[in-house]
Image: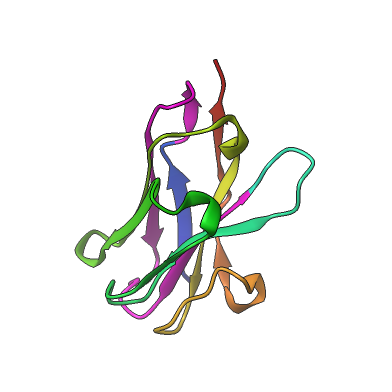
């Protein structure tokens, strides 16, 4: 059974950076695409970014393009989300999710079979 654990969240000032990690256990991530989603206070969960199973393609929501970078290290069974130029509106619980497929989407949560517990990111001065 694949299990996912996010880490790296915290409190950061506007303009700052954080790197989130999504570490898998119980199975290899080699054949899974990974998505990052977030849910801000009082908001619905939304897709942020995703990466295909071999890392050759990535997708980003418009509101994070140019600021966030997704990457993966299959040897470490870990996917990362580098977040730069953070804005107050980025405050949310960030979740990673895995789909046993090559391709990825940030628009269909139902495609993802495994979810982590989330990590809180708070952007505040």
Quick one: 75 or 54, which is closer to the camera?
54
Question: Percent position (x, y) of residue 90?
Answer: 57, 38
Query: What quarter of the picture does the C terminus occupy?
Result: top right
Question: Percent position (x, y) of residue 42?
Answer: 79, 41
Could you tell me if residue 79 is visible in this image?
no
Q: In this view, does 72 lie above or below 66?
A: below
**Farthest top residue?**
125
Residue drawn 54% across and 27% down?
A: 123
Residue drawn 47% across and 24% down?
A: 12
Quick one: 61 or 72, which is closer to the camera?
61
**Farthest left residue?**
75
In-image side of 124 versus 69 (left or right): right
Q: In which quarter of the image is residue 107?
A: bottom right
Span of residues in magenta: 9-38
Question: Percent position (x, y) of residue 5?
Answer: 46, 51
Quick one: 124 or 76, which is closer to the camera?
124
Question: Percent position (x, y) of residue 26?
Answer: 40, 66
- State the count of labels: 0
**Farthest right residue?**
42
Could you tell me if residue 66 is visible in this image?
yes
In-image side of 1 versus 115 (left or right): left
Residue drawn 59% across and 30% down?
A: 88
Residue drawn 54% across and 51% down?
A: 63
Q: Does the magenta stretch include residue 20?
A: yes
Q: Quadrant of residue 20?
A: top left
Q: In this view, does 56 lie above or below 86?
A: below
Quick one: 125 or 1, which is closer to the camera?
125
Q: Does the magenta stretch include residue 25?
A: yes
């Amino acid at each position: 059974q694949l299990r996912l654990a996010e880490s790296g969240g915290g409190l950061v000032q506007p303009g700052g950076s954080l790197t989130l990690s999504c570490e898998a256990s119980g199975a290899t991530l080699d054949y899974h695409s990974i998505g990052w989603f977030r849910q801000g206070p009082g908001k619905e969960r939304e897709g942020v970014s995703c990466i295909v199973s071999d890392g050759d393609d990535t997708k980003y929501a418009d509101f994070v393009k140019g600021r966030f970078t997704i990457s993966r290290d299959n040897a470490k069974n870990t996917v990362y989300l580098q977040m730069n130029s953070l804005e107050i509106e980025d405050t949310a619980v960030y979740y990673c999710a895995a789909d046993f497929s090559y391709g990825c989407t940030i628009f269909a949560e139902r495609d993802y079979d495994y979810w982590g517990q989330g990590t809180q990111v708070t952007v505040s001065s």
